[in-house]
Image (cartoon, rainbow, N blue to C red):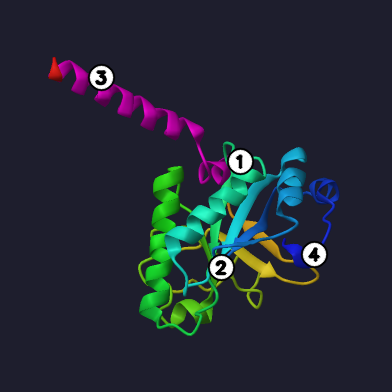
Amino acid sequence: MSNWQGAVDWSAHAASGVTFGFAKASEGADYVDKWFARNWLGMRRNRIVCGAYHFGRPKGDPFEQARHFLRVVRAAGGLRRGDLLALDLETTDDLSPERVSRFARYWCYYIERRCRMRPIVYTFQNFAGKGYCEGLGRYPLWIASPSRPKGRPLVPSPWRDWTIHQYSHTPIDRNIFLGTRRELIALGFDPRDRREQRDRRDRRDRRDRRDRR
């Protein structure tokens, strides 16, 4: 979902069996989707696994865009266990495949380091086939392939498998995840990772202070 859909009835989607959703949060280094906060809260309230995506602009600074994305998510309520983050990679900004893929790798690297989770990469067959996704194979693939049967998309290089398949885009985008809700949540944010990271840092600091005595 994005501002193009306007107000979304998330309770109706939940009642119809929708278990996860993605809402556009940001684009480039300064754009904020005006419906994101409402969509984020709507998914949360209806126990739908929350996903937020950033529309990448490869001409810009990937780290600045990643920071902007996380600020938008934080302003809308922040991350909770199981929340999903994704990079929408579908425009080149007239740059070469090498520069586009480098932008995407840096953006994903920042999110992975900052949030202790691997972001999902949304793209489509022809785009990836031209080399714009080089080096992204370690990140989960969200493949837009509405011309293929549900759950049977073609998987472009550098990936070997897909995680989410967008199998329809009318009247709204429809997606499928081949797995359980628990498996989907396992791909998302886990606050325990942050606590473990802080605990390791605290132990290291105490050890350093002890060594200096």
Of mark 1 and mark 2, the one earlier in the sequence is: 1
Of mark 4 and mark 3, the one earlier in the sequence is: 4
Give the residue at x 39% y 47%. 113
Q: Spatial distance from mark 1 to mark 2, Cα to Cα? A: 26 Å
Residue 86 coordinates in the image, percent (x, y): 55, 57
Q: Which mark is residue 78?
A: 1
Helix, strand or loop at mark 2 = strand
What amino acid type should be assigned to the residue bearing mark 1? Gly
Give the residue at x 54% y 70%. 123
Asked if 101 appears above or below 66 in the picture, the reply is below
Q: Which residue is mark 2?
A: 143
Helix, strand or loop at mark 4 = helix
Mark closer to the observer (1, 2): 1
What amino acid type should be assigned to the residue bearing mark 3? Arg
Q: Which mark is residue 5?
A: 4
Give the residue at x 43% y 28%. 195
Q: How many numbered callouts?
A: 4
Q: Which residue is mark 3?
A: 206
